Structure formats: C-alpha cells, structure tokens
Amino acid sequence: MLELPPNSLPGSAMLSLVTPPRDRADLLTRREWLRAGAIGLGGLTLPQLLTQRARAGAPRAKAKSVIIFGLVGGPAQHDTWDPKPDAPAEIRGPFGTVASRTVGLRVGELMPETAKLTDKLAVLRAVVTNDNAHSSSGYQMLTGVPHAPLNQESATPKPPNNAPSLGAIVRYLRPAAGQLPSAVTLPEHIWNDGNFPWPGQDAGVLGRRHDPWLIHCDPDDARFKIGALAPPDEVPAARLSARRGLLAGLDRTSAAGAHEVYDASARKAFELVSSGAARAAFDLHREPDKLRERYGRSRFAQSCLLARRLVEAGVSLVQVNWTRIPKLENQGGWDTHSKHNESAKAFLMPMMDRAFSALVTDLDARGLLDETLVVWFGEFGRTPRFNGNGGRDHWGHAFSLALAGGGVRGGTVYGATDKHAAYPADGRVEPRDLIATVLHLLGFEPDAELRDAENRPFPASRGSVIRAIL
C-alpha cells in the first residue's frame, strides 16, 4: 500500500491509496449518464457500461451514496431519539422534549433543528449489540458481525475479528467510476485511548486493496488542502511524467503479483495528482461562507460538508467520524462518564444538531437527499442511570439510530424500549440488519457473495432488511 505523506500545513491530509476491483459492475446512475457523455467514465464507453451492468444483474437501487454520520463514543438515547419524560429524574435527566414534524414523536429538547426534519427521517429505537465496550461493540456496528469475545475494550484488528467494514464491502461490490474511490473515511480513524484503532474499519479478509480510503485531515483549518492531491512545487510536470515512466519500467521487471498492491496504489496516486476534478472535490473554499457557517466551524462539521462534496463527485460511501476536542470536558467526545449533562448541553448536542440538520437540509436543497442515505450512527447508547460522577456509562442493550433519504420512509419510528430506555420492548434491530438494509438501499442483495483473499465465499450480511422503514 502506498501512503502519500501529508503536506506540511496543519490542514493537509494523508491518503492511503489502494486500487478498486475490476470484476464487479457499477449501477447505472443519472450522474453516470452525464459522465458517459462527458468523460466516458474514465475510459469506459456507454455500451461497455451497460454491458457490465447487465452482467452484474444488480437490483434497482434507491440510494446512490451513503454518508455515515458517526457519533462515535456513544450518544445517549435519552437525550436524542428516545427520551423518557415520565421516568424518575435519575433516569430522564434534566432535559425536556420538543415536538417534531412527526405526529407523536417527541425528541430531546437539545436537538431543535433536527426535530424540524423528522418527516425525512426514520428512527430506530431498539438497536442492540449486547456489548458495552467501545471497540468490540463498534466492530459489530461497522461490520454486522459480533466481536469474539464481546465486551473487549481496546480490541485491535486481528483474526478472528477481521470481517470487512461496510465501506470495504461497498468498495468490493461497486468499483469506482472516475478518479475517486467508492468509499472514504474522514477525518481520522476511530481509536481508543493509547491510539488503539478499532477493529472493523478496514477490508479485513477481503484484502487491503478493498480498504476504504482513510483521509486524515482538518477541513476547518483555514489552510486546508489535500497535499497528496497536488504535486509538490519542486516536481514540475516533466519530472512527474518521468516518474510515471520509471514506474512503468519497474512494472515490466517486477515479479508477477509481487507488487500488486503497491503498483495499483502508485498508479492511483499518479492519476490523482494529475486530476483537477479529484482535487476540486476536496476544495471547500468553493463553498459559500454562509453555508460553511451553517454546518458549524469544527473539524467534524466541515468533514460533513466535505462528505456532501464527495458524494456529489461520485463517492458511494463516506464515513465521517466524530473527533475529540481535548480542551473540552470528556475530551469533547460522546463518552460522557462524568458531567454528562454539562457536556451534552454545552457543546455535544448543539454541534451535532447543527451539523446533522445542515447536512440533511443541504442535500435536500440540492436534490440529492432522495439518492443519498444518511445514517445517524453510534456504537452504543448510555446507561439508564447516572453514575456517581454525574455521567452515563456504556450501554449496548438498547439504543437509537436514525436514517434519512436514500429510499427511507420519512416520519417513521420503528421499535420501542421499556420505560427506562434500557431494553427493547418491540422492534429489536441488530447491526447486521442495519448493514443488510444499507446494502439493499444501494441496490445490492444483502447476502451478496463476497470472496476473501483465499477466494472463499461468504455473504455480505446475514441480517434482515428493516422493511418497516422503507
């Protein structure tokens, strides 16, 4: 794998580049019709594309892209989608509720902007991992496969917990059309204290060539640019061309297959460096200041805006991970073991509400929401009762998620919990069901056959599509 080093500026980014598969056919989208006439889909003619699509036999897609709005750390169901106003104070907390656009649905009072958009949302109130550890519950949410064993904190990527992430599955099933990959992760990987990366963020058994691109960046930085997408000043076009020729020479002398991943990565790097269209997708300076303010000026919020630009450019899945803010309580994250209410009110909920409502509204205004699925996502919820430090601890026995656009039936609520939002009472959903539903909306069979690096088949998901929200 070729890693392009970040530019020296604080807002630069690093890309880990791998090549997409070539033996899977993409779906024919309206955007692709335009590309077919304009740029030939990176070399494919329209008849070739139609032939590939027919050979694939894929079902009709509702969504063309997915944005994972990742509130990693664990948002509380009580403050968001499943408030319990009639519960005792030690359960419900200090916050009230607010009416939403959906009849009968009241949400936490700290998400007033999101409450105005519930006619576009489907809420899942009884999601379950039965896992109370960030990394192992997160692995299950990202892959649809329970970690072995459950409740293992600071787990790292290694067998047998090497199922592919949803992003990797999408890369496998839908090769990129053009200069950008079909799955991207922003603005950093997910990690536990000590920089222990969660398992389930890469391609696992599918092989590194299907890893989502991980782009470390800070789109809120005034000098933000993707350094890897621009050749260094000291490398003029002639020298770049010479380096391209050197790579071709190495190709002819290398052992067959010995440098497959490196070769594919290097080729993609040269394509990106020379592609103005790819660089343009990352250029947030093209966005009006008013819109950037609407999202909020934070690393996470501006990454959400960047995600919108990437799906416009043809990326099929963008995962945006919440990033810590060290100067704030609980490191500015959702893992609120102390002063939960203070953190929720001061910054967590306002930042989330602002960015999420801006993303959904922006997509809708551009006519993209119907074809873009947005998944409001966390690895688990928080305990029904507060601890002695005024915090809520980890809780994977019942929590809430929400989905918008991309074929989802807005104004729906599926599932219910008991009077304390502690356990499912109805409509239980497991992560594998969420994965199956996302794949279905993208036009894939949820149990589509994948093959690992040893060519052994396994299904993309063993879950059931949540048809009640479609």
Image: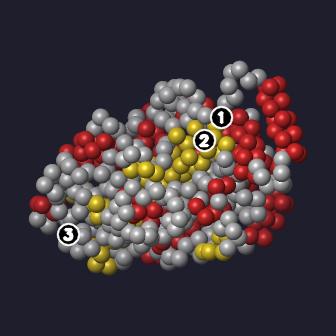
The residue under the point 50% across, 77% down is 464
Marked residue nearer the N-terminal end (2 or 3):
2
Q: Which residue is mark 1?
A: 229
Name the mark on residue 420: 3
In the current view of this chain or complex, which residue is farthest to the top?
234
Judging depth in this view, the residue of 47 and 379 nearest the camera is: 379
Vertical arrangement, residue 135 with respect to residue 2, above or below: below
Q: Work out whether residue 138 can be spotted.
A: no
Instruction: Name the amino acid, label 3.
Output: His
Judging depth in this view, the residue of 211 and 315 nearest the camera is: 211
- Pointer 2 and pointer 1: residues touching (CB < 8 Å)? yes
Q: Which residue is mark 2?
A: 15
CA gap between label 1 and label 3 equals: 50 Å
Q: Position of residue 103 (x, y in %)?
A: 31, 67
Question: Label 2 neighbourhood size at 10 Å, few (<14), some (14-19), many (20+)?
Answer: many
Marked residue nearer the N-terminal end (2 or 1):
2
The residue under the point 32% across, 56% down is 75
Displayed quadrant of residue 92: bottom left
CA gap between label 2 and label 1 equals: 9 Å
Q: Position of residue 15 (x, y in %)?
A: 60, 41
Q: Is residue 31 left or right of residue 106?
A: right
Q: Of the residues tagged 1 and 3, which is closer to the observer?
A: 1
Instruction: Name the amino acid, label 1.
Output: Leu
- Pointer 2 and pointer 3: residues touching (CB < 8 Å)? no
CA gap between label 2 and label 3 equals: 44 Å
Label 3 residue SS: loop
Name the mark on residue 424: none
Vertical arrangement, residue 110 with respect to residue 8, above or below: below
Marked residue nearer the N-terminal end (1 or 3):
1
Label 1 residue SS: helix
